[in-house]
Image (cartoon, rainbow, N blue to C red):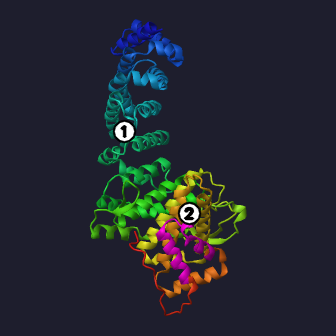
Amino acid sequence: PQNLAIDIMSSIQSQAARRNLPTRERKAMKTQISKFPVILEFVNCQQIRESIVDSNFVQLLSELIATSKSTSFPGDDTFRETLLSIVEAISQSARLLLDLNQSVLKQLLPALVSMLTSTSSTIRFLSLKVVSDILIQLFRPASESIDGNIKRIQTLTLDVIHQLIPQYKAILKDQEAITAKGLKLLNTLVEIDSSIVQAMTKYGITSHLIEYFQAKHMNNSLHTVQLLGSIIKADDPPDYMVLRLICQQHNLTKSVSTLLRQFYKFKKEWFYQPLLEIIHCLLMAAAGLKEDEDGKMVSAKASQAATKALLDQLRPMTEVISLIMELMLVGTSPSKQRKPSIVQIGISKKGSGSRTVSRAGTSHGVDSQSSLNSHTQASVRSLATTVLWLLVEMYPSSHNIILSQANLGRMSAGLIFATRHISQTRSAKIRNPELASDLEVQRNLLRAAYIAVGNDAKRAQILSNFCSKNSQFIRVLQDASQKYKAADSHAQKYAASLCHLISRRTNSTGTARRVNTGRRF
């Protein structure tokens, strides 16, 4: 089989490379091309494929790709499609790709990348698909690069990726199926190695992604959102000039808010986490903070002017606080157990204004029937509450928003769920992977409430009035002020202070004393 394959391929290569073939030779070439699908049958058979595919075979395939790209001959489109199908069959064997990595990375992949400029959309799509299959199997995270051979493969693969990146301006403007495949590949590669983001910025790919980052754009997908998040998170410390440029020139804040509303309205829950991560990253930068290796918030190197400019750009995010508080209830309780509550979350049928919807027991409400797994639900809740307290900390105009009756109801539900889980997990002494998220939710909600009430007697009275009609809220605050039910000592102090404020009688001109809990961040 190997000799037959090489004979057919060699004959086609020599004849296709010549121009103005005599009639006799053109007929001979047509005969050889008609035999070409036999090779596809060989490589589709696992037992035969292992015996015929070697470095010489891969080299010949690479040369055929290059020859067929630059030459026209009878049946050339069908020939190229069969040729790419042969390569696709080979790409399904991870062992073959690793064994023949030198030939694949130095000869085959560069030839395939060159096919991305073909005039045929079918050829472009097949080429990109095969490139994607090979790169994803050969490109490994740096943490897996233990021995020298794997590290060398990683380096060679990265070189090919950098040859591919310049093609992306054309890929992102291509037909929808090709663009979707390209975005998926790029997102996978960036997840493995974030350094690729620098090449994306260099070749102007970022501007295309932001262009797609619109509610009704056909190329706006989960991969688009995740890639944009990777770009925003790429620099440490944050590049404030880039962030401000993205927010100002491309109106990113409005796009994020609109998308969050749209995805909530149509229950596209898989978008919640990446969108919240983008908001979180931007708010952290505006606050002059970053996360260290242990996940703790520490000061970032940033000028006051840079953070203030970004702070002003992000102010419209306060308009979606109610929706963010709705997202912190993902998976908290069965909808049938939650009382229907008509609440304002700022969703409009026509994209402007707001309308009232039922939070529980409706098609638009967030409830435990979520399609997300429990780990992702916990991450969404944690992210939503972190975003919430950052907004409350940074924008005083948000204080009255979270103290509305509907949002206090959401806060109560979130606190009850988190505190109950913390107590149950600690009492039973069981290992709960979501415990860290529950602790974060409780801490963030208590901190947000504490900041919102502040030393304002009127806001303290609003909270007190709510608790007089919702005894569960005061009970959960009392529980959170106990050591074994609180996330940490700060959460205890926040809860104890809120209990104290509620129990005090306040007047319209007085002020409520705040407990000193140290630095807020």
Is most of the magenta stretch helix, strand or loop? helix
Q: Is residue 104 visible?
A: yes
Q: Is residue 493 magenta?
A: yes
For disc 1, the marked residue is 142
User: Residue pushed farthest right?
Assistant: 336
Indicate the position of residue 386 as horizontal and vertical percent values. 47, 64
Between marks 1 and 2, how big is the CA–CA gap? 34 Å
Identify the element where label 2 is drawn.
loop
Q: Amino acid at mark 2?
A: Met
In-front residue for pair 150/75: 150
Structural crowding at the residue carrying mark 2, measured as other residues with C-alpha within 10 Å and reported as few (<14), some (14–19) or many (≥20): many
Circle 1 crowding by C-alpha within 10 Å: few under 14, some 14–19, many from 20: few
| Residue lying at 41% horizontally and 25% vertically, measured from the top left | 98
Which residue occupies 37% across, 71% down? 312
Q: Is 287 on the left-hand or right-hand side of 83?
A: left
* Residue shown at the point (36%, 50%) measured from the top left: 206
Compared to 416, does 474 lie above or below? below
Image quadrant occupied by the C terminus: bottom left
Specify whether residue 260 is in view.
no
Comparing 155 with 151, the one in front is: 151
> Which residue is denoted by mark 2 in the rendering?
328
Q: Position of residue 459 (x, y in %)?
A: 52, 83
Q: Which is more toward the observer, 502 or 483?
A: 483
- In front of the other: label 1 or label 2? 1
Q: Position of residue 518 (x, y in %)?
A: 39, 74
Q: Which residues are magenta?
A: 474-501
Q: Is residue 43 above or below residue 196?
A: above
Give amino acid for label 1: Ala
